[in-house]
Amino acid sequence: MKVLVIGGGGREHALAWKIASEKDVEKVYVAPGNGGTAVEEKCENIDIKGNEALAAFAKENGIDLTVVGPEDPLASGVVDVFENEGLRIFGPRKDAARIEASKAFAKEIMVAAGIPTAYYGEFTDYDSAIAYVKERGAPIVVKADGLAAGKGVTVAFTEAEAEAALKDIFHENVFGEAGSSVVIEEFLDGEEASYLAFTDGKTVLPMVSSQDHKPVFDNDKGPNTGGMGAYSPAPVVTDEIFDYATEKIAYPLIQEMQRRGITYKGIIYAGLMVTGDGVKVLEFNCRFGDPETQPVLSRMDSPITPIFEACIDETLNKAELIWSSEPTVCVVVASEGYPSSYEKGRPITGLDDANSIEGVKVFHAGTALKDAKIVNSGGRVLGVTARGQELGETIENAYKAVERIQLQGMHYRKDIGAKALRRLKG
Ligand code: AMP
Ligand code: GLY
């Protein structure tokens, strides 16, 4: 079987690695891939962009299955393009991808489906938006409606911060079309967790729970990033919360979509806030999380391609997954200066040394292979992932591996998994 993975981050390296580990898989192309997928067994990077060009490649090269990592191609209809060409592809069509591509649409679906979420209002002009902020008061959360590369959300602790965010959106037009409307919602206080599941539009097959670390510095300080680390399972997600997420969040979502004539196939990613007042959905994504995929797939002990196939064929009710009970921890190594600007092209060494630690796999994100050397090419550079018998030791192993890696100016959070450890110790 030949597989194509679209994307080039840490999530896509984890997907390509997992897919390539299966004996039925002979080749995994990654478009565009990164320095990790360039050297991963059975994998080959291809420099092809655009939905039509990717579909043409899949056709010409006899690709049996395509898996999409990021939201942008999904939102622009890559699945529709492939399906129109008779190609097999895993992911939501453009109409279903709106669950991530429009926050206002997601809120409308949640309200219609009775999915618990923050109170909100939707606005298309500055004056009515600011009037709502004044009426509600701070803290309050301002979200640009469309895809904004993870930068569209402002958690405003004062009215002035909300006002500044709204000025950026409506007056300065910083998010372009993505900011033509905003969702303003109630601030929720609690602990976040990620719930990921496969769906074929009828059945939901959940993965194991995980938790991301969005702020750049330890103890959740500093600006938000794409994610500085993750671990699985997340003890804040009790069995009860996990089942609640499947029954009261994921199923109502696909059923409400179906009522609107939309078959939701692919990944359901629910960003949860576990509050004193129950679990609420912060957002839906229509794809695997990054970096959550790295620790989650590291616990998947059965093959993943049959699950992709079952979603495409709408036979997920017959599919099964085997998960390890061992915890996994992924520490993200970032470039100097990230999440602000950073220099690229710096050499990275010590990777083999890090990988040689029992249970450790270093997934690449923003790296490239240049003149047979690995260099940084993005803000989040590596996802150093460990799997072990017990959480404390697994965290230690992940950091032991990180310390074997050299990249000038690199930084990382020192407290990945600490919240879970505290919770487990009561
Ligand atoms: P989103 O892209 O909607 O998940 O928002 C990005 C981040 O902003 C989330 O991971 C939360 O940390 C924070 N956030 C979003 N919505 C809320 C909310 N209603 N209350 C508190 N924090 C929020
Ligand atoms: N880890 C957050 C995301 O993938 O959106």
Image (cartoon, helix red, strand yellow):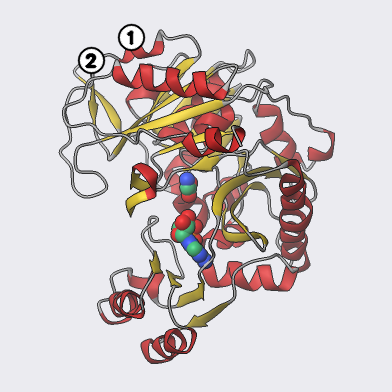
Residue pointed to by mark 1: 353
Observer-nearest of 144 and 311: 144
Disc number lying in front (2 or 1): 1
**In the image, is 344 to the left or to the right of 356?**
left
**Which structural element holds mark 1?**
helix
How many C-alpha atoms fall within 10 Å of the one at disc 1: few (<14), some, or many (≥20)?
few
x and y percentages locating residue 141 in the rendered image: 45, 71
Observer-nearest of 351 and 87: 351
Q: Amino acid at mark 2?
A: Ala
Residue pointed to by mark 2: 372
Residue 146 location, quadrant:
bottom left
Residue at 39% x, 36% y: name it.
8
x and y percentages locating residue 376 in the rendered image: 24, 30
Residue at 57% x, 47% y: name it.
193
**Which structural element holds mark 2?**
loop
Residue at 23% x, 36% y: name it.
335
Residue 139 location, quadrant:
bottom left
Q: Amino acid at mark 1?
A: Asp
Q: Which part of the image, by quadrant, shows the N terminus?
A: top right
Q: Is residue 67 visible?
A: yes
